[in-house]
Image (tube, helix red, strand yellow):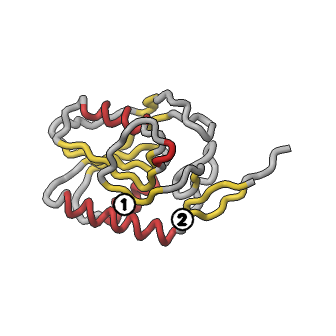
Amino acid sequence: MTIPLKPVILITKEEIHREVFRLAQEISIDYDGKNPLLLGILKGSFVFMADLVRLLEIPVEIEFVSLSSYGSAKVSSGKVKVVKGLRSTLEGRDVLVVEDIVDTGLSTNHLLDYLHRRKPASVKLCALLDKPARRKTAVHIDYLGITVPDRFVVGYGLDLDEKFRNLPDLCILED
């Protein structure tokens, strides 16, 4: 018999909103007069990206890619797979990658390398969460929300085997 996991709040929806608002202000200032392409990484970033876009004070275009390195596990396999690639041309564009969480850094670096090969004018990274304790490769985060401990986080779009995405807060799971 499996014991159900109970979500315990790590970061409240109010704290999340404050961070998203702060990030949107910084991005709006830095990209003033530009029309960046926001590139969301599915599925985890969709809630964060939707909230971020609504708070931006600049015009943006939106695109999504899908990467996988987890499957149904709590630990990254270390093998990054592009599940859904780009449809937009990036050459000469300012690109802002919107990521839910930077964990090992392997997926993020894989995507950043993929983007740089397409000759954009610039590529920057915005991450709601950073988990540096799990880092396997260096990643520069231009716009960072919150640093979290080495615990598996769910809610606000992040999941465990497609469960818990709907939680409004960011939570850890306890037995």
Q: Amino acid at mark 1?
A: Leu
Residue designated by label 2 = 11
Q: Residue furthest front?
A: 133
Q: Foreground residue, 109 or 81?
A: 109
Q: Foreground residue, 132 or 89?
A: 132
Q: Position of residue 133 (x, y in %)?
A: 50, 46
Q: Amino acid at mark 2?
A: Ile
Query: Does residue 40 lie above or below 115 as drawn?
Result: below
Whole-angstrom CA distance, mark 1 to mark 2, is: 17 Å
* SS assignment at label 1: helix
Q: Position of residue 99 (x, y in %)?
A: 40, 48
Q: Position of residue 73 (x, y in %)?
A: 63, 37
Q: Residue at x 44, y 37 (%)?
A: 66
Q: Residue furthest right?
A: 1
Q: Residue at x 62, y 37 (%)?
A: 72
Q: Earlier in the sequence, mark 1 or mark 2?
A: 2
- Would residue 67 be found to the left or right of residue 114 on screen? right
- Would residue 27 be found to the left or right of residue 174 on screen? left
Q: Residue at x 55, y 35 (%)?
A: 76
Mark 2 neighbour class, 10 Å CA radius: few under 14, some 14 to 19, many 20 or more: some
- Would residue 24 be found to the left or right of residue 45 on screen? left
Residue designated by label 1 = 52
Mark 1 neighbour class, 10 Å CA radius: few under 14, some 14 to 19, many 20 or more: many
Q: Position of residue 1 (x, y in %)?
A: 86, 44
